[in-house]
């Protein structure tokens, strides 16, 4: 069993509820047990997941957003 780590990302281009859903769904598609918290103000996404940060960045990018570690 892998342990869960918490990662915080700065995500560019999030402006609405649709953006929140797209980012959340992209992460959950890779780790259904992930805890995803999005702050639209400031573009911050915090994820508790068994996945590595680079895997989460790829998932967010596939949803159409640029992300990097905060």
Image (spheres, rainbow, N blue to C red):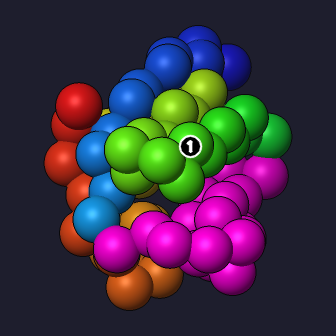
**Magenta highlight on residue 2:** no
Residue 32 visible in the displayed image: yes
Q: Against 54, is 2 above or below?
A: above
Residue nearest the viewer, comparing 60 with 11: 11
Residue 30 visible in the displayed image: no
Q: Against 19, is 37 above or below?
A: above
Q: Residue at x 67, y 20 (%)?
A: 1
Q: Position of residue 49 (x, y in %)?
A: 59, 32
Outermost residue to the right: 33
Q: Against 60, is 53 above or below?
A: above
Q: Quadrant of residue 60?
A: bottom left
Helix, strand or loop at mark 1: strand
Q: Position of residue 27 (x, y in %)?
A: 59, 59
Q: Quadrant of residue 61?
A: bottom left
Q: How many marks?
A: 1
Q: Residue at x 41, y 27 (%)?
A: 7
**On the picture, is 70 further left or further right than 37?**
left
**On the picture, is 47 further left or further right than 36?**
left
**Magenta highlight on residue 26:** yes
How busy is the neighbourhood of tag 1: few (under 14 within 10 Å), some, or many (20 plus)? few
Residue nearest the viewer, comparing 2 with 5: 5
Residue on which disc 1 sits: 39
**On the picture, is 51 further left or further right than 64?**
right
Where does the C terminus fall, quadrant-wise?
top left
Q: Position of residue 56 (x, y in %)?
A: 41, 52
Q: Position of residue 26 (x, y in %)?
A: 60, 70
Outermost residue to the front: 41
Q: Residue at x 38, y 44 (%)?
A: 42
Residue nearest the viewer, comparing 12 with 47: 12
Q: Which residues are magenta?
A: 13-32
The chief SS type of the magenta part is helix
């Amino acid at each position: 069993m892998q342990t869960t780590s918490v990662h915080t990302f700065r995500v560019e281009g999030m402006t609405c509820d649709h953006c929140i859903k797209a980012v959340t769904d992209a992460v959950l598609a890779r780790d259904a047990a992930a805890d995803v918290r999005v702050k639209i103000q400031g573009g911050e996404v915090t994820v508790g997941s068994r996945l590595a940060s680079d895997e989460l960045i790829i998932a967010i990018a596939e949803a159409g957003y640029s992300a990097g570690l905060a």
